[in-house]
Amino acid sequence: MTPQTRILLPLFILMLGAVLQVNAQGQLQIEEDRAAIENAHRLYYSRQYDEAVVAYQKILESELTKETKDEVRMNLGQCYAKRGDDTLAIRTFQEVIEDDPNGSYATQATHQIGNLFVRRYQYKEAILACKKLAESYPESRASALAEYLIAQYFHAQGKRDLATEGYRRFLEDYPSSPYSISAIYSLIILYTEAKRYVDAEDLIRNQLRKNPKDTDMMEKLGDLYKTQGKHDEALNLYTAALAHAPDDISLREKLGGLYAEKGQLEQAIEEWTRLIEEDPGTANRYRQAAEIYVKHRMYDKAIESYNQAIKLDPRGAYLYAQLAGVYKIQGKVNLAVGTCLEGLRKVEIGYHGRETLIEEITEIYEGEQRERLLEQVIAQVKSYVTRDPRNPKFVLALAELYFYRGRFDLALEQFRRLPQLYAADRGTILQKYAILLQRAEHPAAASFFRAIIEIFPTSRVARNSRLRVARLYERAGQPREAIEILTNMKGVNVDAEARFLLARLWLHGIHDVDAALPIYQALMDQPLPAAGRTKAQIGVAECYLLQDRYGEARELLARIVDGAHLSAPAQKLIGDSYLFQADFEKAAAEYEKVLKFSSSDESSNDALDRMILIRSNSDYVNVPLEGYVRALKANLNGGPEEALRICRETIEAYPQALIVDDMWLLMGEIHKRQGRYGDAIAAYEKVVVDGGLTAAEGLNEIAAVYHWGLRDTEKALQTYLRLVRDYPESVIVPYARQQVDALAKLQPN
């Protein structure tokens, strides 16, 4: 080793160590950034957009690679979009484009800017935004996509001339863009629709000159000729394309279809038979051939192919359903039903599409014919169960048939038997039908969910069922039943969602502030996401209001209003605090502030209602209004009889007061919650008879009493129909129409 080497070697080792240390530190920093990014992504995918925005903004303050920076900014922009902040979303996406208009994230950002408007059907705004991008970043990938999107948006609106011009300009400016082939396909469609056949043919032949073996273009040219009635030319092109792509099912179908149109059925069948000959051992080929035969109304050939497919795949539920559909087209109901029953015997539980066999039977007829057919099929399946009582397929089929027949009690009886015969059932089958009833708002939904809880007490399905049935009871005005369900969640991890529901039931259902407050206080101390903690704080503040602890409530609510979460509900409660103290001017001013946070959510709607209540009922020096507020608070604080007494005394003292209708609505609500349905209807009828602005609301409440309280769906339906007929301009009408549709399905005929 030379003296020079002896001197330089330690220096080299020292430098190498320093470099390795720097690299190690850099790697550690990258790992720390990645962990922060993953956490931000978790917040984003959990739809906690406010928290995700804060996390992404903090990440962007650190050193990042370009790819990571773009990734973070893209998700940050989407968070803004999800929150409805278009300005910040567009600005964030534009920053991505500006940094590198030719980058992969630039095209994503361009698409996101356009989609921001298109998802609201604001095509004009989307086109203007894309035009601005195309002009700002010419000859870039972002500009190319922007021009393509402009044409696409015109096309989506049905503006064919502008779309045609847009696609042509795009192809002239960016002929090598990856979107060019899509633009060509769209132009071919537009030219064909406009009967500009020469332009369409020129476009296709230009592509074929570039690639003579392009089977897609051969097929499109064949389609073009077929559209013009040039069958021989189309035939030649389809044949030529099939020579290059013999496995192309679409081409084979079109070639056979062309033969059929020309009356050459033997050649058509020969072409379609080749689909099977190329792979004769699979059911899928026979199914494909059968579907083609159905399209061309060759039903006997379709039946033959479906039967062959079933032989190869006897557990393919969809094959039985499709074969039954062919028999139904032919009017052969017995064969259609027999095919479905055969499928139910052969197809095991859990196989995809099995439920469609029952649905196929129920859709053969409507009205009385449907009921008679279902009774016949039920009798047939009951005979199967009698012969083989431990066959789970037959028991499930009988349960499903009873369900569609509307005999929910008998259906549930069979569903209860199923777990004893089918060990794989963990409640998901019964849950499916419980949810169907819930969506139809049928009272039997609660029985189905309770059966799940009883049969599968420790399963995930049972936990979900407890929450669902509790919400059903809450909506039906049965808070005590809902509380019983939730408080019996022993052995199950009672999460924050269930505890929030329990607290709400105590506070708004039972009106027991002392029971609700400790639940909210415990939640407030839990390690919840920011939105969850704020929700708990709002619950605590609401309890404080009803305990006359107005100062403590306002102090807590003021901190929420200054933050980023749930500011509107908190501000609305500040208004309530002054309302309960009869400081109406201050209350109205605080309610008005809610509209600055939001103009169309529940809190803003409630605040607006309270503002209107205050400003529309100032007669008699606010004395009747004060009575209403005292009654309202008494009711919210668990004193329904006190609230009713205050209402009656106020109405008696001021029978002409403007707030009388609101008094009757409040009395109706109290009677309804107490189960005094006759008194509730009588109170609501007072509002309807007056014919004032709240008459439609009164009818809506009467319908709800019939539906959920008295379980009289016929009277509920008639009341909703009366509302729609007599008050067509009311904002409640769209909801009433939905209820009419749902209740009509529950009527016998």
Image (cartoon, grey):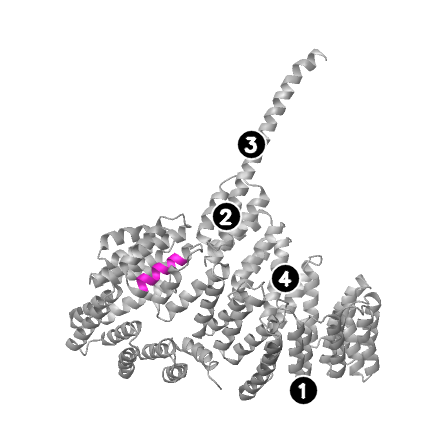
- Quote the CA–CA distance across marks 2 and 3: 23 Å
Dot label at residue 148: 4
Marks 4 and 2: in contact by CB < 8 Å?
no
Up the image or down, 275 lies above or below 502; here it is below
398 or 1: which is nearer to us? Answer: 398
What is the number of callouts on the image?
4
Q: Identify the secondary structure beneath mark 3.
A: helix
Q: Identify the secondary structure beneath mark 1.
A: loop
400 left or right of 540 in image:
right
> Which of pointers 1 and 4 lies earlier in the amino acid sequence?
4
Q: Where is residue 444 drawn, in percent x and y? A: 45, 74
Q: Where is residue 741 drawn, in percent x and y? A: 46, 79
Residue type indicated by callout 3: Gln
- Quote the CA–CA distance across marks 2 and 4: 33 Å
The residue under the point 56% across, 78% down is 401
Q: Identify the secondary structure beneath mark 2.
A: helix
In this figure, which residue is indicated by the disc labeled 3?
Answer: 25
In this figure, which residue is indicated by the disc labeled 2?
Answer: 40
In this figure, which residue is indicated by the disc labeled 1?
Answer: 332
Q: Which residues are magenta?
A: 498-508
- Quote the CA–CA distance across marks 4 and 3: 45 Å
Magenta residues, dominant SS class: helix
